[in-house]
Amino acid sequence: MRVLIPGISGILGRRSARRLVELGHTVAGLDRRPFRDAPPGVEVHEVDIRKRAAEDVFRTFRPEVVLHMATVNHFAAHGEERYRINLGGTRAVFEHCRRWGVEHAVFVGRHTFFGASAESPLYHSEDEPPMGLATFPELADLVAADLYAGSEIWRFPKRTTTVLRFCYTLGPSGHGTLASFLRGNVVPGVLGFDPLFQFMHEDDVVDALVRTIETRPRGVFNVAGPPPVPLGVLVRETGRKLLRLPEALHAHLSGRLGLPRLTRGALSHVKFPIVIDDKAFRQTTGFEHRFDEARAMAEYRAAFPPAEHAAGGVLSRIVPWSR
């Protein structure tokens, strides 16, 4: 099949392209970033998905499948730029799909769509609405893009549209929001909370994307791997130190003394879990994850070993109950 990947130059886009080429598919990509070591035969067009040149790629390549991965989180872009990339870019992708007869469109979303709050159920099913926008407004553009992609399912029933909501990824590339959160030697938690974190190995993400292209499921699907683990276990097994801070201190210490920078909205994700039920995707596509949680954490730790630095000692003196 001819597969076009908007966002091909990201870590998961590159891995997906290589796997699809190995399986005999013809692959092309769109991205503003270069993909210098692209596999032979893979056309990479360095254009903005919202520009006329992107539609020319649809017109000339005539993809049968579009794997839309060109979205960003609140760490990678801010404010209006996120809306232009996530919502504007998603709208452009689906408009091109309609105009040029794409048979199968896949939108790659995130499980953070559901948001984190004290009122949320432990396991989220696909038909639940987003509940975290009041506490985490930075998610609004990704939620809007997800809902727009989902509306294509019933607005254009002749085309197969698949919306995938992936949990966090973790693995040796250090790709993704969770991997960035764990990058330092000290990881901040909230005193009195130890939420579950759900993640899957990045190679399992690629497997799930390939299964989606092969089976062409129609609808919205949660995608996950092994069972979730508490934040304390995740931090310990990746070799980091968990610093449990009173909630009021987070805003003052965010981005300082070696701690990751978190927005006020992101704080809810350090207090409450976001765990998804992926039964429908497994039953529909036959997907099975290959890497358990221990393997994913171990590979991340090997690729990004903790480095001792002064921040840990300073913070331990400031907050003596950290562990």
Image (spheres, rainbow, N blue to C red):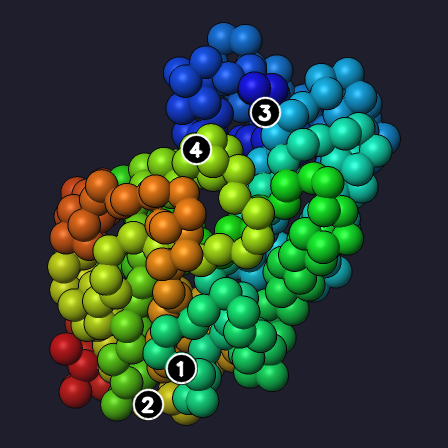
Q: Quadrant of residue 11?
A: top left
Q: Which mark is residue 246?
A: 2
Q: Quadrant of residue 133?
A: bottom right
Q: Which mark is residue 137?
A: none
Q: Earlier in the sequence, mark 3 or mark 4?
A: 3
Picture coordinates of residue 286, whole percent (x, y): 34, 42
Please tell me whether mark 4 sits on a helix, a strand or a loop: helix
Give the crowd class for mark 2: few <14, some 14-19, many >=20 residues within 10 Å: few
Picture coordinates of residue 90, whole percent (x, y): 71, 48
Residue 56 visible within the image: yes
Please tell me whether mark 3 sits on a helix, a strand or a loop: strand
Front label number (2 vs 3): 3
x 32%, y 37%: residue: 203
For residue 21, above or below residue 113: above
Q: Where does label 1 land, which residue?
A: 121
Q: CA distance from mark 3 to mark 4?
A: 11 Å
